[in-house]
Image (tube, rainbow, N blue to C red):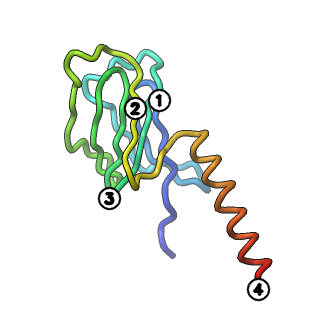
Amino acid sequence: MARQTPLYVGTNGFVAALDPDSGQEHWRTKLPKCGGMGDPVTMVIKDGCLFAASHGRVWCIDKTDGTVRWMNGLPGTGFHSVLLAMEGADAATGQDAAVGAAHRRRQQHAAAAAH
């Protein structure tokens, strides 16, 4: 049986991959040099990378094992929340995920009704 796509969670300076059926944690990574302190972690996913951002920094994380590939401290921008966008990437925020899931359900229902 193929492994299901993980649920990625970001909070308080950590990013984790969970099994969406059981909630079992596959991996967890502390974002180096992240201030944490309750700041949200925004994420986008593309080409095997989970890009995470928080507290004025951006990280590239290997989505299979949580290894940090690189970090950019965005010098001179402060230590605030960071929003990410990348053409062709999947956004990993609750609102975007909910909108995407609703869109996929509508497409599936329309395809099923057409048959």
Q: Give the secondary structure at mark 3.
A: loop
Q: Which residue is drawn at 34% across and 42% down?
A: 51
Q: How crowded is mark 4: few (under 14 residues within 10 Å), some or many (20 or more)?
A: few
Which image quarter holds the C terminus?
A: bottom right
Q: How many labels does the image show?
A: 4
Q: Name the residue beneath numbered marker 4.
A: 115
Quarter-wise, where is residue 95 in the image? Answer: top right
Mark 4–mark 3 Cα distance, whole angstroms, equals: 33 Å
Q: Is residue 62 above or below residue 12?
A: below
Q: Which residue is drawn at 49% across and 40% down?
A: 9
In this rendered view, identify the residue nearer to me: 72 or 37: 72
| Mark 1–mark 2 CB contact (< 8 Å) | yes
The amino acid at mark 2 is Phe
Q: Name the residue beneath numbered marker 2.
A: 14
The amino acid at mark 1 is Thr
Mark 1–mark 2 Cα distance, whole angstroms, equals: 5 Å
Residue 98, image x and y in percent?
64, 47
Q: Give the secondary structure at mark 4.
A: loop
Q: Give the secondary structure at mark 1.
A: strand
Mark 2–mark 4 Cα distance, whole angstroms, equals: 45 Å
Mark 1–mark 4 Cα distance, whole angstroms, equals: 43 Å
Q: How crowded is mark 3: few (under 14 residues within 10 Å), some or many (20 or more)?
A: few
In this rendered view, identify the residue nearer to me: 75 or 23: 75
Q: Which residue is drawn at 32% across and 59% down?
A: 47
The amino acid at mark 3 is Asp
The amino acid at mark 4 is His
Q: In this view, does 81 lie above or below 91?
A: above
Q: Name the residue beneath numbered marker 3.
A: 47
Q: Which comes sooner in the sequence, label 2 or label 4?
A: 2
Q: Which mark is residue 91?
A: none
